[in-house]
Amino acid sequence: MDILGFYRRTVKNNLFTKTILLFSFITIVTIIAFSYFMFVSMSQSTVRRELDNQKAAMSAIDRYIGLRIGEASSIMPDLYRDDALSLDLSYFLLNPYADYVRYRLDRYAQTGIDAANAKSYFKNVLESRPDIRALVLYSSEQQALYAYHPDGEFRVVPVNASQSYVPDAMALENANVSEPNAWVNRALGGIGEAMYSVTVPVNDKQSFKNLGQLTVWFDSGRLHQALTAYEQEFKGDIFVLSADGRVLFDTSGRYYGQRFPYAQRLESVYDVNSSGPAPENGLYFNKLASTAGGYTVAGILGEREAAESYRNLQRTIVTIGAVCIVFAILVPSLFIFNFAKRTNRIIRLTQRVKRGDLKTRLKDTKEDELGQIASSFDDMLDELNQYIDRVYKADIKQKHTELAALQARVNPHFLYNTLEVIRMRAVSQGAKDVGEMIYSLSMLFKSFVQQKEKHTLKDELEACRLYLELFRIRYKDRLAYDIQADPQLLDLEVPRLSVQPIVENYIVHGIRSRDEDNRLVIFADREQGDIAVRVRDNGRGIPAGKLRELHAGLGRSGEEPEGGFGLRSVHERLRLLYGPEYGITVHSGGQGQGTSVEIRYPDSGEEERHVQSISGG
């Protein structure tokens, strides 16, 4: 089989086949690209929704723990409201337990009434609140633990400092939600795992002396109740971590009693993600940090688990994309093949006419372009048959038309001459200051519009001088300026309008028009291998907040704001020309303290520095 011949006949020399192939290629690439970007966008939206659902479940956990913290914090205030109960608690913690029992028996023998009982109070608290697994009272005076177990058992455990680390552990003030202290748990015989504790101080109501600590141990398993409404909505695992990264609650049940393996990664996760979700090592992270409780609620969603949520979306997009590709190629192909068939008829007719058959006709009745071509060809053959014996002579003439676009331009010399006439008229009438201002304006305009191959530092400083001279005359010598530059730097090339906008910024925003001591100084010198130009003034200065906004604006790239060249324009042009280490730096002591702007250019040489002074007014 002649493959090359088939290729030439069906593809290379067939315009309609090439059109179909090109159109099909563009259609397939477009639909695939659109489907891909739509899938990426929708899958990210789906993952973001899953993370939001997980964040909602984490918020429910956070609220639930907050309520438990509130319950623990309210135990002691409720007790302090009863003076007799508060007094009984003080005796309970300041004396040995045997003395306290005798004290209670003596009181009962005297009154016959079982008065306020701190021990019973804590027992009632434990029984009325199912989330509490244990209550632990620590007496710093007796160095003893009083534990209330959920089974109703009450235990007294001496924890002398010479025999246990419990006194040291209980002496630490810790207001955060944390894991139950291991030494306390061991001293009590091991109550169990999957708990979190809240510690509140116990003080004497009268003397405010600290008597010890009350530690409330909550059952972490109860936190599952907060997730009841979210079980079908969120995916992944949720953890509650103490300040030191220990796992207090784990929906997966894998990390109880351990340090959270992703604690270091979690430190770089913010509570609110402004960008789209991005996995790290196949995991998405969520975080809610509680400042009051000192704990963190963390969420982890596996990338594979997240992918399950948009698996059906992927199949749907692939199916719709395939159907669109089929229809987008099939329907236009049918029209193109029809046009190809009619076009081939016209080609065959022209070949017969070329061989001398002038009687054949197309007879295409359609009114589209091909139909008009066929009809015109038939008419042409009819006329050709009528005038076959005539000799046609045609003179071919070519006409060339050129459109001249006229651009009106202002002649700079005319403007200079006009300004000079106005200046001489002002001088002749005694308005010397007006004449000086017109002269400065004329020279300044000339320096702006003239096109020089090399714009030097001298040209830039001269433009600044002319500009300052205008305003020195305007403010009637209430403005003084001084320009100092190393003579060896004056011929170095610098960008046009890189210093003058700084001076203009001072005139617009910094000058104190009512004061007599306005002063601006421009220094230009070599410094650490660069050219440093500093513009200092004693003007209004920049408030601290505005200065921070200005620094932030210089750090951002974007479109130049309206108003022409400004600080940001100069900064961005210098960075684009020379690199990020160059540009401008703004310093100000604050409101009324003046402003200093430093412009840095690169300099390849290191030469001696000589300063010349150009003073005005």
Image: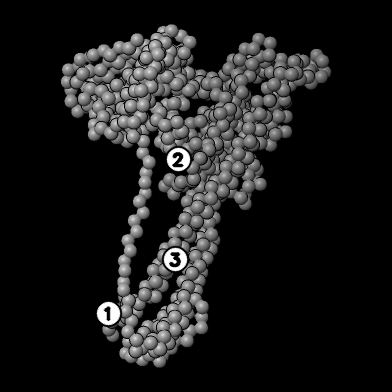
Q: Is residue 404 left or right of residue 194?
A: left
Q: Residue at x 31, y 66 (%)?
A: 398
Q: Secondary structure at mark 1?
A: helix
Whole-percent x, y for residue 290 in the image: 56, 31
The N terminus - image quarter: bottom left
Q: Secondary structure at mark 3?
A: helix
Q: Could you say which quadrant of the image residue 87 lies in?
A: top right
Disc 3 crowd, CA 10 A, few/some/many (<14, 14-19, 20+): some
Q: Residue at x 60, y 42 (%)?
A: 56
Towards the viewer: 463 or 603:
463
Towards the viewer: 367 or 193:
367
Work out how far the residue at label 3 is from the one at label 2, CA to CA, in angstroms.
Answer: 46 Å
Q: Could you say which quadrant of the image residue 227 lies in?
A: top right
User: Which residue in the structure is indicated by mark 1?
Assistant: 4
Q: Amino acid at mark 2?
A: Tyr
Q: Amino acid at mark 3?
A: Thr
The reply to whether residue 472 is visible in this rendering is no
Work out how far the residue at label 3 is from the one at label 1, CA to CA, in angstroms.
Answer: 27 Å
Q: Is residue 515 left or right of residue 424?
A: right
User: Which residue in the structure is indicated by mark 2?
Assistant: 262
> Which numbered tag is attached to residue 27?
3
Q: Residue at x 39, y 89 (%)?
A: 385
Towards the viewer: 523 or 235:
523
Q: Earlier in the sequence, mark 3 or mark 2?
A: 3
| Total count of labels | 3
Q: Residue at x 58, y 17 (%)?
A: 140
Q: Earlier in the sequence, mark 3 or mark 1?
A: 1
Towards the viewer: 360 or 433:
433
Whole-percent x, y for residue 485 in the image: 25, 17
The C terminus - image quarter: top left
Callout 1–callout 2 Cβ contact below 8 Å: no
